[in-house]
């Protein structure tokens, strides 16, 4: 019986192996391992992709969000105790970035169809301390609609995109600056290049993308010990730099991002067309937007039994995410509104294999296995 692992990074990177080796050798031979050509070129290419003016390469996706919020505090736009609305159905990093800056995360339940932040709930969550909304483009589905934009404009709130899972995605609604591309929809975005991402490094990495000149300069300084020039520290900053090797790896893989996203979309369509088990609810493929399918997530009430069945039949799976922030021990005292959709999803979601080398034919075979469950 053929095995279908959930994710094998060696296999995922195999198509680019020779180019990755050559790029690494070029950096090693050049002898500049930070703040050099590969990072500069990657920043230009990511800003162009996101249709934004600035990109700042940083150490990882969490640091990207932390730096954004810290920069807003340094610029006097936020202060300790201010509130940021964030979806409850997200990886904990989205929430960690908020609380790490002395800000209060305000959890918002998601919509069931998108599994993203439900903008219809925003008005009830606004208080005099609200300063920003952090939509997360979860699993690669863009989170932007007219209600989100209206609420942000009406209350003077910043829109901070968590674009960790949706690089290259395209929204059905234009963002604040007219772009439809995730990363360029709001005021600023944080990107993750964690190895499992559609555009993944061979270590860790991240980026901040924005059209705001002052914000970009502040983030860049904060990420480099708070310095605007050598040995001149204008902030009490961090060491959150992206290294040249990872930038070079990402530039190689960036050339294939459209192909990667298109392949995942074809696999997702094959799953949706072929799974017809009433016990398994498939995700929605939306017209008018481009989803990148960082994860292909189904819902099953008897999840443990379902995953055991998949494993017995050679199919890997994972859960993204079983423990939302308000169930984490570190946030046990966090006040929040009722979160029924988040809690339902946390008990039911299962991620199926979608990354290379999984093909649409593989997805159809996996679907036939699922249909026997």
Image (spheres, helix red, strand yellow):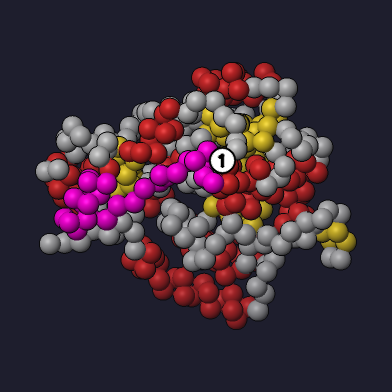
The magenta-colored residue range is: 304-329
Residue 48 visible to an observer of this rendering: no
Secondary structure at numbered mark 1: loop
**Is 213 placed above or below 150 here?**
below
Residue drawn where x is 54% and y is 46% of the image: 329
> In the image, residue 360 lies at what x, y percent?
23, 49
> In the image, residue 328 lies at what x, y percent?
52, 45
Residue 339 visible to an observer of this rendering: yes
> In the image, residue 216 lies at what x, y percent?
72, 47
Examine the image and state in which quarter residue 323 appears. Answer: top left
**Is 118 placed above or below 188 here?**
above
Residue drawn where x is 82% and y is 59% of the image: 227
Report which residue position mark 1 lands on: 332
Residue drawn where x is 46% and y is 75% of the image: 21
Between 325 and 284, the one nearer to me in the picture = 325
Q: Is residue 104 left or right of residue 231?
A: left
Task: Determine if the magenta segment contains residue 305.
Answer: yes
> In the image, residue 256 lies at what x, y percent?
42, 56
**How many labels sit on residues?**
1
Dot 1: few (<14), some (14–19), or many (≥20) neighbours within 10 Å?
few
């Amino acid at each position: 019986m053929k095995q279908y692992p959930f994710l094998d990074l060696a296999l995922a990177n195999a198509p680019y192996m020779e180019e990755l080796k050559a790029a690494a050798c070029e950096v090693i031979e050049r002898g500049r391992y930070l703040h050099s050509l590969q990072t500069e070129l990657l920043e230009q290419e990511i800003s162009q992709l996101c249709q934004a003016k600035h990109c700042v390469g940083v150490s990882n996706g969490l640091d990207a969000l932390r730096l954004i919020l810290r920069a807003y505090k340094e610029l006097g736009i936020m202060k300790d105790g201010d509130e940021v609305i964030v979806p409850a159905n997200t990886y904990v990093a989205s929430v960690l970035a908020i609380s790490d800056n002395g800000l209060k995360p305000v959890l918002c339940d998601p919509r069931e169809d998108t599994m993203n932040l439900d903008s219809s709930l925003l008005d009830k969550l606004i208080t005099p301390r609200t300063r920003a909304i952090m939509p997360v483009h979860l699993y690669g589905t863009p989170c932007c609609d007219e209600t989100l934009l209206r609420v942000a404009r009406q209350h003077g709130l910043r829109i901070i995109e968590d674009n960790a899972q949706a690089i290259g995605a395209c929204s059905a609604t234009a963002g604040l600056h007219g772009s439809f591309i995730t990363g360029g929809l709001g005021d600023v975005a944080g990107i993750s290049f964690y190895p499992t991402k559609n555009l993944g490094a061979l270590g860790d990495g991240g980026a901040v993308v924005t059209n705001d000149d002052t914000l970009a300069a502040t983030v860049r300084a904060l990420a480099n010990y708070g310095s605007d020039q050598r040995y001149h520290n204008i902030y009490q900053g961090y060491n959150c730099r992206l290294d040249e090797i990872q930038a070079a790896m990402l530039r190689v893989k960036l050339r294939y991002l459209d192909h990667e996203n298109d392949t995942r979309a074809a696999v997702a369509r094959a799953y949706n067309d072929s799974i017809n088990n009433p016990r398994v609810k498939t995700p929605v493929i939306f017209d008018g937007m481009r989803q990148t399918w960082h994860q292909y997530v189904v819902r099953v009430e008897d999840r443990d039994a379902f995953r055991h069945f998949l494993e017995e039949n050679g199919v890997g799976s994972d859960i993204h995410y079983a423990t939302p922030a308000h169930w984490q021990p570190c946030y046990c005292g966090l006040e929040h509104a009722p979160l029924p959709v988040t809690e339902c999803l946390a008990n039911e979601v299962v991620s199926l294999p979608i990354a290379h080398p999984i093909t649409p034919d593989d997805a159809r075979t996996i679907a036939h296995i699922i249909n026997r469950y």
